[in-house]
Image (tube, grey):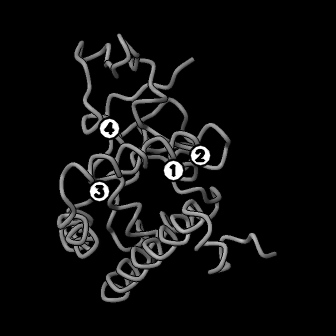
Amino acid sequence: MNQSIFNPEQQQQDTASKVVAGLERISEAFKALLWEKAKTLGLSPIQIRILLFVAYHKETLCNVSHLAKEFNITKPTVSDAVRILDKKDLIIKDFSSSDSRSYTILLSTKGKDIVAQTEHFAAPLKKQFDGIPSKDLDALFSNITKVIFGLHRTGILSVQRTCYGCRFYDQQKGNDYCKLLETSLAKKDIRLDCPEFEPKG
């Protein structure tokens, strides 16, 4: 009990516990900002996140099965959100695949308008990070990508598209290297959500 990361005394003795507690606070800020925007538009947070994801990712990822993995929620939950988005004419279901039961989710014109109204909801968070010196920010980002990759390897995160788990990633002479781009990568070049990502193995 005393070693719980939620125990302030434990946090004082263990920096990792303090970091986890800090990330929980940042997560709460993210959720609060998202909820505030969602309420003004009559949408749920997951509906907004689906619209934002569809706006900026390739069509092969924009289906119910992948979205469930992406957001670590059930397929029925995604299906319900998509049904409401469809009812509000914010998306288009494209059934052009060979499987008549599955479809790709596309944005309608109204959906693109909602994305334009919502995509900057997390700007207050970014503003706080903008004030951190670039060297410190690069180090922070490098550690975050490693944590995300580690969470994926242990099965806590279903999806990750960071370089470390990509088949194009390699180490050459102790440096990060992308075989697709045929170039060395600085720590700040490591991608968190690479559009060219292909999983190893």
Q: Mark 2 points at which residue?
A: 151
Specify which label sits upstream in the sequence, 3 or 2: 3
Tag 1's secondary structure? Answer: helix
Which labelled disc corresponds to residue 191?
Answer: 4
For the point 27% across and 53% down, the residue is: 136
Q: Which residue lies furthest to the right in this view?
A: 1
Q: Are marks 1 and 2 in contact (CB under 8 Å)?
A: no
- Type of amino acid at the residue the image marks with label 1: Glu
Tag 2's secondary structure? Answer: helix
- Location of residue 155 (image quadrant): top right
Q: Mark 3 points at which residue?
A: 107
Whether residue 114 is visible: no
Q: Mark 1 points at which residue?
A: 70
- Type of amino acid at the residue the image marks with label 3: Leu
Tag 4's secondary structure? Answer: loop
Specify which label sits upstream in the sequence, 4 or 2: 2
- Type of amino acid at the residue the image marks with label 2: Leu
User: In which quadrant is the C terminus drawn?
Assistant: top right
Mark 1 → mark 2, Cα distance in angstroms: 13 Å
Q: Residue furthest front?
A: 13
Mark 4 → mark 3, Cα distance in angstroms: 25 Å
Viewer-closest of 185 and 10:
10
Viewer-closest of 107 and 135:
135
Viewer-closest of 178 and 102:
178
Specify which label sits upstream in the sequence, 1 or 2: 1
For the point 49% across and 29% down, the residue is: 165
